[in-house]
Amino acid sequence: MSRLWSVYTAAPHRVMFLPGVMQGVLVMLWWLLDMESRRAGGAGLAPGGMPGPALHVWWMLFGFFPFFVFGFLFTAAPNWLNGPAIPRAAYVSVGMLLPLGVALVYAGAFMPGLAIAGLALHVLGWAVAVWALFRTLIKSPPQDKRHPAIVTLAALLGGLGDAAFLAWGGADWADGLAVAEMLGIWGFLTPTFLAVCHRMIPWFTGRIVPNYVMIRPYGPLWVVLAGCLIHGVLDLFGHADLAWPADLAMAAIVFRFSAQWGVVRGVRQVRLLAMLHVGFLWAGVAFALYGVAGLAALAGSDWSAGYAPVHALGIGFFATMLIGMASRVSLGHSGRKLEADALIWGLFWTVQGVAAVRVLPDLAPFLPAAMITLAGLLWLLVFGLWAWKFAPMYWRPRVDGKPG
């Protein structure tokens, strides 16, 4: 048992990705069962009296994606900074507190009081994660720290969102849910993924594509990050339709970045690189959908994009980038070749199908609502097979015999 624990805690991505791959299955299984229960006239599976849709927000924004965000940042940020590694005690603490918090929230379906305790433990684990990133940031030597600073600030905003959800569920703060959703999407996940893409996609492309000229201007990145905050604040105050100028500007910048980073050449190279380029395009699609929806509302149109933009962002952008980045980290740090085999490649394209199937019913209401359930089932297929492939890598030693 001590040998297993030593291997499992040998690197931060191990203790974060394993609960992450498990959550990839559990969050969607829970959502499908809860949705079916409510359709049948039942109370759903939400613990502690929290509505199912509200908990679905928490699961995705705070109880699923952050495992991979922190697992990646705990690995990458010290390398970006040439700074001190995340201390073992810190990443192990986060790797225990966050999953324990999630487990107690699940258990709250049977013992309601456990849900609030779980949310509190989750916030505590998040605080440890932010402090670990901040410590690495300030203790690293003087250099360009813009990307690490952005993701550290985004993690802080995400922690505030996590705490806001706790205040909503545990202290009846009426606005807590809206604040949590705004900070989770526009303060944490979207800025984090955008900053990581800005840092890594040109760098990875330059290592593979011959005669590649890296173009990575910061000015447009600041505009996109400001656009995220503008959209989030307007949405919080019920005026998301007024964010369309920022939304369309963000879409234009994303598509411009994609062209500058060589999306056409990139997708023709190795599969792991193609996954990142395709995933980044979904960010532009999502922002464009937000912008078009805002313009339609401004024009008084009866048409609405519904939940299409947020699912284009969450499934198309976040989930695709997660598959690409986490697969790369898992393969490389387990001593395997950085190659996407037929299974990984197939799962990547299935995620594109999941995003399309979930987005289309909101854009075209004449399509059957059953497509939403189909999207959930396809998600289960993808993350079930992905967990089957990658989970053992997190408790087994590296195949090349190296530490870590």
Image (spheres, grey):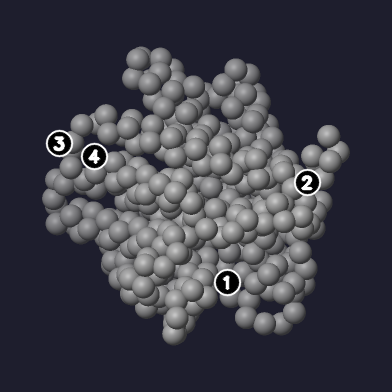
Frontmost of labels 2 and 1 is 2
Q: Are marks 2 and 1 in contact (CB under 8 Å)?
A: no
Which numbered disc flags the more N-terminal residue, 3 or 2?
2
Q: Residue 379 location, x and y as percent? A: 42, 38
The amino acid on which the numbered mark 1 sits, given as a three-letter code, is His
The amino acid sitting under disc 4 is: Pro
Q: CA distance from mark 4 to mark 2?
A: 45 Å
Which of the two marks, 4 or 2, is nearer to us in this view? Answer: 2
Amino acid on which the number 3 mark rests in the picture: Phe
Q: Earlier in the sequence, mark 4 or mark 2?
A: 2
Residue 153: percent from left, percent from top: 60, 64
Q: Is residue 167 visible?
A: no
Q: Earlier in the sequence, mark 3 or mark 1?
A: 1
Task: For label 2, count other residues whose C-alpha is less than 10 Å away and answer few (under 14), some (14-19) or many (20+).
Answer: some
Residue bearing mark 1: 147
- Residue at 44% x, 17% y: name it: 43
Give the number of the disc on residue 366: 3
Please indicate whether residue 362 sits to the left or right of residue 174 in the image. Answer: left
- Looking at the rendered structure, the secondary structure element under dot 1 is helix
Q: Position of residue 319 (x, y in %)?
A: 45, 49
Residue in front for this viewpoint, 113 or 79 = 79
Q: Which mark is residue 361?
A: 4
Q: Taking the image as drawn, is residue 260 in sight?
A: yes
Query: Of marks 2 and 1, which one's residue comes earlier in the chain?
Result: 2
As displayed, is residue 303 above or below residue 234? above
What SS does tag 2 mark? helix
Which of the two marks, 3 or 2, is nearer to us in this view?
Answer: 2
- Residue type, numbered disc 2: Val
Residue occupying image coordinates x 52% and y 75%: 207
Which badge, 4 or 3, comes first in the chain's sequence?
A: 4
Marks 3/2: CA–CA distance? 52 Å
